[in-house]
Amino acid sequence: MDRKPKISEKLIFRNIRERVGNNLSAENGRAEGLGSANQKARFFGQLELPIERKLERDRNADLGGRSFYFFDFDDNVAFLLTPSFIFHKETGQELKLSSGEFAQVHRSVGKSGIYKNYRIDFCEQTGTFRKFRDKDLSWVERLLGKRQSFVEDLAGALGFPDFHWKGPSWNCFHHATLNQRPLAVITARGHSPETIREGISLFVKEGHIPLEPNYLAIYPVSNKKVRAELGDPQLILSTAELKKAAIRKAVEQAIAVYGYSPHHRFGMSDDDPHNIELITSEMKALKVLYPEMSFFIIETHRGQATKWEVFADRTEASLCVDVSNNTNVEFFEQLSMSL
């Protein structure tokens, strides 16, 4: 029988951070004797910058342009403990995997490696991704304060120190929110947009961001209604293809709401290399349609952040730094000014 040892939530968070290149091996012992909370925050690499954040105008505001920020959520804005489940092909036994574990092995489940005898189950209510979907909560559950899993997981994460849950794009997310840049959340999750909004509101309630984001759109691309909106009513497109469609939709929405300007700038932040490939492809196509506008990708993968400018025939990297603990203030400042 296949068995998987239980591990604590704190250890799961540590494993997630290690997956993106952050070594927290001796953090508790080495922190002994540190004085103020600010000293400890700087030591631990808390993602709040050690500088006062000020309101900044859009880079091209004087020319009538706006800066639009698009964010993937998991492992990018924040690390959550939402688990996935795989099932033994013969016995049907369920095996729980952390988000970090699943991200590493999902392409080999049922094919090779230690999980070759397991399968992925796409049932919305009982399958592999059930914690990434909304449940039909009864009125009694709602009365008793039961919330959707995304909201519960985010609330649970906020109970840990900042360095455990803030992702590599947190500073950009905070900057976009503080300055009320039009913002879209484009996530692989399948919750309703309302659930995503409810979860992000916890950042405001807990004081991690000063106010609600200026939402342009929320696209949880595995949600069936959202998939239909993105042109996939038959549910045949991959997550990366759906994110690609969501980017185009968000750009069209930006022009519809804020008007056309050749000085608009669009940036998408994601941590998955396969998603990055299709996002790049879509932005190249958008650059052909809107040649005077600017398009950027912020790739956050294994502790590195790379900023790419996308042209119709190529991409050019202008920044590439280690952001495994997200304390690189120079990178953040350059990134903020460039978008």
Image (cartoon, helix red, strand yellow):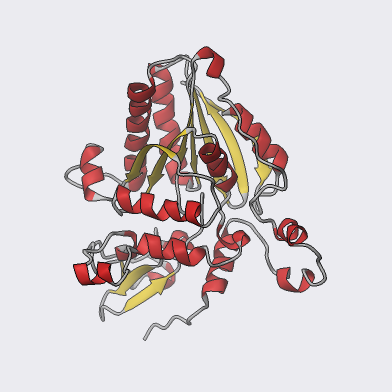
- 201 up-or-down from 80: above or below: above
> How many marks overall?
0
Residue 125 against residue 217 in the figure, above or below: below
State the residue lying farthest toward the left: 234
Is residue 124 shown above or below 181?
A: below
User: In the visual, does 292 lie left or right of 131?
Assistant: right
Q: Residue at x 30, y 54 (%)?
A: 191
* Place of residue 76 in the rendered image (x, y in percent of width and height, measured from the top left): 51, 50
For the residue pair 141 and 10, the one nearer the viewer reads as 141
Q: Residue 33 location, x and y as percent?
A: 82, 71
Q: Judge whether residue 188 can be spotted in this image.
A: no
Quadrant in the rendering for residue 110:
bottom left
Residue placed at 35% from the left, 69% from the top?
85
Quarter placement of the C terminus: top right
Q: Residue at x 54, y 19 (%)?
A: 61
Q: Quadrant of residue 45?
A: bottom right
Q: In the rendering, at what x and y percent does residue 200 appear? A: 43, 51
Relative to residue 304, is residue 245 depicted above or below? above
Where in the figure is residue 82, as x and y percent of width and height?
Answer: 41, 65
* Residue 139 falls left or right of residue 75: left
Q: Quadrant of the N terminus?
A: bottom left
Q: In this orientation, does residue 209 appear?
A: yes
